[in-house]
Image (tube, grey):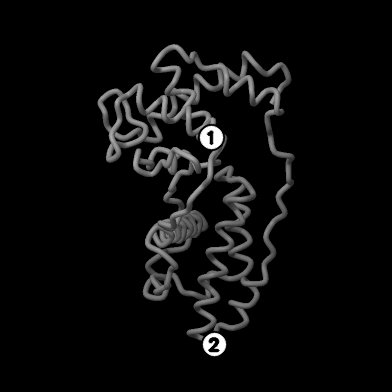
Amino acid sequence: MYRIIFYRISYPGEDMAIILSASYRDTFRLLFMFLESEGKKLSKLKLADISPSCVLQFLEWTETERSNAISTRNLRLAVLKSFFGYVLSMTPEFSEQCTDIINISAKKVEKKPPLYLTESETKLLLNAPERNSREGIRHMAILTLLYDSACRVQELIDLSVADVTIGRCCKVFVKGKGSKYREIPIFGETGRILKCYINAYGLKSDDALFTNRSGERLSQGGCFPYNEQIQKIIAGTVSRQL
């Protein structure tokens, strides 16, 4: 049983492989935890023990005992479907068991409308930082670039000054998921704000675009204070409940 679990998969990229392998690891770790709670000994576990009904009970356990969201439940199911798809291709004698598990339907997730700021609220948010201070210019640069480029936080903090082109055609060169790069055009006003910020902090082309007080590249954890300040700004500018 253990031999077949650690099967080989080809992934599209190194970053994706790390994410997917963690997903598989966590799913089987929880599955084994569930099986032990049901009185099964892992040392004597057989592939046939993981039946379709066992998988359904495991999924229910993740929701009730682990308080997992439906989306997490569906992720665990997707991993098991992938695994048993591999088992089906390697051991046809388990075809009925594998097919029944592969055909288990994912649970529907109730879709909620996304939260958003109106155009006027967005303008208030972007204009809220104090422009006369270095810290205010920094906040404005972060907020404006996030809004204009739609970068993820990790993508933003990975940027270097050399990744920003300011001139007739302003743009940023972003490294995204799967180590894929893309060029994102930005407004001229965003470029002027970034230029003002870069000049105010005396940054050079090989410097990180956003750093902490020690001059090191900003981390996601280091962005939390900014999130709190942004929430305060939102609370002061948005009258309705988000």
Q: Which residue is mark 1?
A: 188
**Numbered disc 2: secondary structure:** helix
Q: Residue at x 50, y 43 (%)?
A: 169
Crowding around mark 2 (Cα neighbors within 10 Å: few <14, some 14 to 19, many 20+) is few
Q: Quadrant of the N terminus?
A: bottom left
Residue 77, image x, y percentages? 58, 61
Which one is in front in this view, the residue at disc 1 or the one at disc 2? 1
Crowding around mark 1 (Cα neighbors within 10 Å: few <14, some 14 to 19, many 20+) is some
Q: Nearer the viewer, residue 191 or 46?
A: 191
Q: Quadrant of residue 44?
A: bottom left
Q: Quadrant of residue 94?
A: bottom right
CA distance for labels 1 and 2: 61 Å
Q: Residue at x 49, y 13 (%)?
A: 130
Q: Horizontally, is 90 left or right of 214 in the view?
A: right
Q: Are marks 1 and 2 in contact (CB under 8 Å)?
A: no
Q: Is residue 140 visible?
A: yes
Residue 198, image x, y percentages? 36, 28
Q: Residue at x 50, y 77 (%)?
A: 86
Q: Quadrant of residue 236?
A: top right
Q: Earlier in the sequence, mark 1 or mark 2?
A: 2
Residue 49, image x, y percentages? 52, 71
Q: Which mark is residue 69?
A: none
Q: Horizontally, is 59 left or right of 37 in the view?
A: right
Q: Which mark is residue 92?
A: 2
**Numbered disc 1: secondary structure:** helix
The tally of labels here is 2
Q: What residue type is disc 1 on?
A: Gly
Q: Quadrant of the C terminus?
A: top right
Q: Horizontally, is 173 left or right of 68 in the view?
A: left
Residue 129, image x, y percentages? 51, 17
